[in-house]
Amino acid sequence: MRLTTCGHACVRIEDGDRVLVIDPGTLSARDALAGATAVLITHEHDDHLDTGLLAAARAADPTLTVHAPPGLAAEIGATPAHAGDVFTAAGFTVRAVGADHAEITDGLPGCPHLGFLVEGVYHPGDSYTVPDTAVHTLLVPVSGPWAALPAAIAFVRAVAPAQAYPIHDAHLSDIGIETADWWLAAKGGTVYTRIPPGETVTLPPPGAATGVEAARRLARRRRDIQPGLTAAEFDRIEQQYGFTFADDHRAFLAAGLPTGGNFPDWRDGDPADLRRQLAWPIDGVLFDVEHNGFWHDSWGDRPADAVTAARTLLTGVPALVPVYSHRYLPAGRGTSGHPVMSIYQTDIVYHGTDLADYIDREFSAGHPGPDRQQPRATVAFWRDFLRD
């Protein structure tokens, strides 16, 4: 599932040919509704609903469905949605959240208003209403005549999502955006990053919850975290280096890209250095074959040219991907929950039962170091070296 920001309050949620757009307003990109199969409108204000843009999209595609609060739905010919309703839009399961428009003054604006929870992604419209169900990805409004930064921080803390992205920010200058982002990242209590307008992030698959939790734990301890890798960046990295990230590792890097120290710089790093880090586990085994007499039991008799033979045999072992320094996770889309391994030649130990546990162990003061309990061995060959 992919999330694209389209300016101010408007976002697109996509999965294959399913395209759901929320709040295409007058401050949104003019192509926000291109290819949309359904639209959700939180309320009537023009920065959330551009009636001309919507009318043009419906004229181009009469099958386009639109859902809005009852009073507004009657005005624009949409399907009414009531607080608590659960329905399907563009193939996504949507829950309408009863959320009054935040007051500006004297009870205003007081217009019909809803928030929408789309398979874990919560768009609150012009409100800081906390839903009574779990939220994975929160879209947090950061500006407006009704908004305030302390309230936004309190909102993020109360919702307690796995990750948060800002919306409703057209009123802010560049300095205002920088200020809001700093405070929300520092005090929101979760992974908070900005998606540049028009950019897309891939939301984690169900098996990636551990990676998002790991990113949230790291964000509490470090400030040197850039916006997460985009879908296009993941595609480039995986094609360039010939592996795919495990789901939890991918989710970790999509939520926020840690920089500095010994983190691999997947966005701007030297390709030669990244290849060296990827080759480290294999190179370490080959070093022990050449200098320390190592030979794996499954390889049969040790030949005279052991290094060349071992190099050929090692081409078939599962790939490992660096997390930090010489800590590694197995590669492989569709997999998750692997223990993190600390690898130095054939001296290999567990350094966390999973990615979230590893973050605690590596970056918490007084962490207990390598795991002393036997986690679940998950990957062939490398598990033969592991010891508790």
Image (cartoon, grey):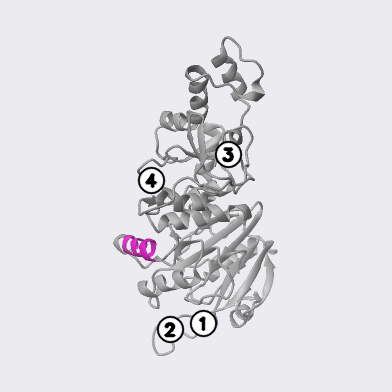
Task: Give the mark, 4 or 3, whose residue is nearer the N terminus.
Answer: 4
Where is residue 10? Give x, y as percent.
Answer: 51, 64
What amino acid is at disc 4? Thr
Instruction: Say whether residue 210 is magenta.
Output: no
Task: Give the mark, 2 or 4, whose residue is nearer the N terminus.
Answer: 2
Q: Are marks 2 and 1 in contact (CB under 8 Å)?
A: yes
> What residue appears at the point 45 percent right and 73 percent down from the top-left corner?
155
Gap in angstroms between the C-alphas marked 3 and 2: 49 Å
Q: Residues within 10 Å of mark 4 (few under 14, many from 20)?
A: some
Query: According to the image, label 1 marks what residue?
Result: 100
Secondary element at tag 3: loop
* Quarter residue 36 falls in: bottom right
What amino acid is at disc 2? Glu
List the single residue furthest toward the bottom: 106
Which of the labelled discs sits on residue 103, or is there none?
2
Dividing the image into 4 quarters, which one contains the C terminus? Answer: top right
Q: Residues within 10 Å of mark 3 (few under 14, many from 20)?
A: many
What amino acid is at disc 1? Asp
Dividing the image into 4 quarters, which one contains the N terminus? Answer: bottom right
The answer to whether residue 161 of the structure is visible from this angle is yes
Gap in angstroms between the C-alphas marked 4 and 1: 40 Å
Q: Look at discs 1 and 3 and give the one toward the viewer.
A: 3
Which of the labelled discs sits on residue 259, or is there none?
4
Gap in angstroms between the C-alphas marked 4 and 3: 20 Å
